[in-house]
Image: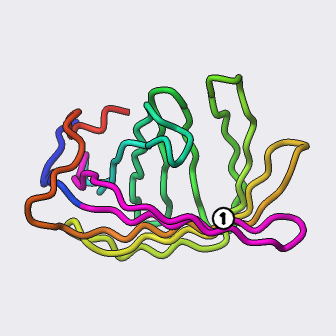
Amino acid sequence: MAVTGARDVMLRITSRQQDERGETETISLETPGRFGVRGRVPFLSYEESSLTGMEGTRTTLFLYPESVSLVRTGTFMQKQEYRVGEETCSVCETPMGMLDLCVRTERIENTVEDGAGRLAIAYAVELRGLFEHRNEIIVDVWEEQGVHGSQRGTAADH
C-alpha cells in the first residue's frame, strides 16, 4: 500500500510500569521518527535504541479509530493489538527466544493528527506465568525544523 503524507517528526516516549508490589518505574526518551498514512491508517514509526534494550528493531504504531496495532521488526519481532476492554495476546520473538504476552487494554487516547499530538495507551501486561504489570505508554509527537527521522525509509512495510 502507498504511504502518503510521510514526514519526519520527533517522538517523546514515556513508559510507566507498575509491578505487583505497586512500585512504579518511569522511563522517557526522545527519538526521531516518521509520521505517515498507509491505506488511510495513520502511523508512527521509529528505531529502537540500546536505551530500550531493543536495538536493531523498528517499531511502528498504526493508529486505527478504535484500536492501535504495534508492529516490531528486526531484532525483536512482534505484532500486538490494543483494543479497549479486550485481552489480546501475541508472541514476541527475541534473540533469547519466544515470549507469550497478553495485554488487557484499559484506555486509549489518540489526538495524533497530521504529524502532531499525543497517543496514550494504558494496559495490564502478562508474561505468561512470570509476572503481570500495569503499563502506560505516552507518545508525544511534533514536527521540528532541521530534525530528520529514520533514514531507513517511510513505507512501514509490516
Magenta span contains residue 94? no
Residue 139, horizontal then vertical, whole percent:
42, 67
Q: Main secondary structure of the magenta part?
A: strand
Q: How is the image coloured?
A: rainbow
Q: Is residue 34 magenta?
A: yes
Q: Which one is nearer the viewer's eye here, 14 or 122?
A: 14
**Where is the C terminus found, in terms of image quarters?**
top left
Residue at the spot 22% in from the left edge and 65% down from the top edge: 115
Residue farthest to the front, as pictured: 51
The three-letter code of the residue at mark 1 reads Thr
Looking at the picture, does residue 56 appear above or below residue 34?
A: above
Give the residues in magenta.
Answer: 10-38
Toward which corner of the image does residue 95 lie, by quadrant?
top right
The image quarter in which residue 92 lies: top right
Q: Is residue 132 left or right of residue 73?
A: right
Image spot of residue 67 (x, y percent): 50, 61
Q: Looking at this view, name the residue that lies furthest to the left.
A: 146
| Quarter containing the N terminus | top left
Q: Residues within 10 Å of mark 1 (few under 14, many from 20)?
A: many
Q: Is residue 134 above or below residue 130?
A: below
Question: Percent from the top left, x then y, of residue 54?
Answer: 52, 38
- Which sits in the foreground, 158 or 131? 131
Q: Is residue 76 left or right of residue 124?
A: left
Query: What is the x, y in percent for residue 117?
Result: 31, 75
Q: Secondary structure at mark 1?
A: strand
Q: Residue at x 41, y 59 (%)?
A: 64
Q: Residue at the spot x=62%, y=27% of the render?
A: 93
- Taking 92 as reference, is 13 above or below it? below
**Which residue occupies 58% across, 57% down?**
82
> In this figure, which residue is indicated by the disc labeled 1?
105
